[in-house]
Image: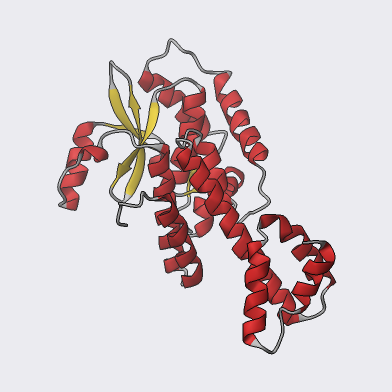
Amino acid sequence: MNQREIKALISLLDDDDHEVSQHVEGKILSLGGHVIPFLETEWEESFNPIIQRKIEELIHELQLSIMIERLQAWKNGGGLDLLEGMWILATYLYPDLSMEKLKTSIDQLYYDIWTQFRDEMNGVDQVKLINSIFFGPMNFAANTKNFHSPSNSMINVVLESKRGNPITLCVIYLLVARKLGMPVYGVNLPNLFVLTYKSEATQFYINVFNRGIIFSKTDIDHYIAQLNIKSKDIFYQPCTNLEIIQRVLRNLILSYEKTSEQEKSKEIEKILKSTLDDNLEE
């Protein structure tokens, strides 16, 4: 379909016949993501607020489809690159976000710590060194004032503002630690996401939301007992990159529910379901 034909379709978006406008919307959506630049041009050139609003809705719908396709491809490829998964999620609010920009930001954090890092340090000392820089000169901290803000789940925003929720702060910390060659992984605790340093010789835990405080398995035992829930292996052991992404999505659903943005909450539920296996019930 050429540009003239797309232009003709767009002009029918405000047709008085609802069936016609619905058919036109379906036809435009069937063209896929490559039609977005045409839609953006038509939005700029249009003086019809109804058509402009419908174009905005169509662009959002197409961007959502692209995001879901990317996320499914990432999952089917093994979910190997956690930063890529976080980038895909961030494109929900920032569709033009560059993956390269995120990589550059993480590389800079890594370099600033690497210059003071020593491989011969034991795990605890390595974590203490990262903490002293990550929460010191780098100025990362918990976003306690706006804890439920959806932006806390957007890695690009957290990298810029240096404020985030437990899981996004953990992801940034984890990405840097892994680049430093450390055996650091995410752990899905109830109500709190933490990290674990797990090697053949030792295992301990890191609460990034609380300035990287180090704690033990016994501390997790006490935490689970206080919550009065049954202990599970997943509360102590590393989780996958896919599980991290799914938890970020669940956090986003909660954020949008707290801010009474039900449409966005439903969209994130749709995205989450696209990452679940067919035989899994959410």
Report the quarter where the N terminus lies. Answer: bottom right
Locate residue 232 relative to residue 40 in the image: left or right.
left
Q: Looking at the image, which is closer to me, 225 or 67? A: 67
Q: Looking at the image, which is closer to me, 80 or 168? A: 80
Residue lying at 39% horizontally and 23% vertically, measured from the top left? 183
Measured as percent of width and height from the top left, residue 77 is found at 48, 36
Residue 154 visible in the picture: no
Q: Looking at the image, which is closer to me, 237 or 269? A: 269
Residue 98 visible in the picture: yes
Check the image and report above or below for 66 versus 118: below
Residue lying at 59% horizontally and 33% vertically, measured from the top left? 106
Residue lying at 15% horizontally and 52% vertically, measured from the top left? 228
Measured as percent of width and height from the top left, residue 173 is found at 47, 34
Residue lying at 63% horizontally and 30% vertically, measured from the top left? 108
> Going by the picture, which residue comes out furthest to the bottom?
16
Check the image and report above or below for 242 versus 94: above
Asked which quadrant contains residue 55, the reply is bottom right
Measured as percent of width and height from the top left, residue 84 is found at 55, 39
Check the image and report above or below for 246 versus 37: above
Measured as percent of width and height from the top left, residue 78 is found at 45, 35
